[in-house]
Amino acid sequence: MDNPCQQNDKENVSPDLDTKRKDYLEWRDYFMSVAFLSAQRSKDPSTQVGACIVNDENKIVGIGYNGMPNHCSDDDLPWARKGNWLDTKYPYVCHAEMNAIMNKNCSSVSGCTIYVALFPCNECAKLIIQSGIKKVIYMSDKHKENDCMIASRKLLDLAHVEYTQHIPKHRKIVIDFDNINARHK
Ligand SMILES: Nc1nc(=O)n([C@H]2C[C@H](O)[C@@H](COP(=O)(O)O)O2)cc1CO
Ligand SMILES: [Zn+2]
């Protein structure tokens, strides 16, 4: 068995500060993280979704999360999932993909890739297709069997929009605001 003191020593090895960092975020994990961070802005009590649109130069050109439309107070609209349809969030909420497309900071997102936490529904699939986005990278397709997801795949397939599930290199990415104050010897 290892000497526990030795093991401790190994764990405490400080990073090599003279050579290039190896555990930096790769592009896909980075863009998916941006989508997940943006989701933290959502007021939806049950599901927070974020989306991030990236062009072929790896530049972010749009970010969005699910929320109520502009100028419609999210205190005046319902957030419920069940009950009379008009008393639920569903007729009112804008999906993350819609917001990311509408928030674009360039003239067109044609040819871009959208990173999104949940597989796009059929309504978002239509927006994705019409905007010219060519690739969807999603984290979860937990509603795969729902009709709106089946319709979504049908549309994306017909329009030749690729979709791929993201397998993250890092399962968890922590943002530690104190980290920047660490001192290196
Ligand atoms: N791709 C998606 N983008 C989204 O922004 N959403 C949003 C719409 C709702 O605000 C929420 C789903 O709520 P719920 O049915 O899990 O309580 O996530 C949902 C999906 C899934 O299709
Ligand atoms: Zn949608």
Image: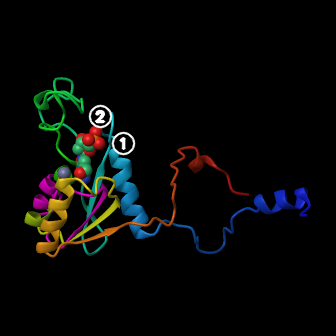
The magenta stretch is: 102-127
Name the residue beneath numbered marker 2.
43
Local crowd size for mark 2, using a 10 Å CA cut-off: few (<14), some (14–19), many (≥20): some
Residue 88 drawn at (x, y percent) = 18, 31
What label does residue 64 carry, if any?
Answer: none
Dividing the picture into quadrants, the one containing residue 33 is: bottom left
Q: Classify residue 33 as left or right of residue 60.
A: right
Gap between marks 1 and 2 measured at Cα = 8 Å
Disc 2 on helix, strand or loop? loop
* Snapshot colouring: rainbow
The amino acid at mark 1 is Gln
Question: How many numbered circles are shown?
Answer: 2
In which quadrant will I find the N terminus?
bottom right
Residue at the far top in the pictured view? 76
Disc 1 on helix, strand or loop? loop
Determine whether 40 is above or below 60 in the image: above
What label does residue 40 carry, if any?
Answer: 1
Q: Compare residues 51 and 183 and report the one nearer the observer.
A: 51
Mark 2: C-beta under 8 Å from nearest atom of ligand 1: no
The residue positioned 54% from the left and 46% from the top of the image is 176
Dividing the picture into quadrants, the one containing residue 56 is: bottom left
Q: Is residue 119 magenta?
A: yes
Q: Compare residues 25 and 133 and report the one nearer the observer.
A: 133
Q: Classify residue 183 as left or right of residue 177.
A: right
Q: Compare residues 142 and 18 and report the one nearer the observer.
A: 142
Residue 2 drawn at (x, y percent) = 89, 63
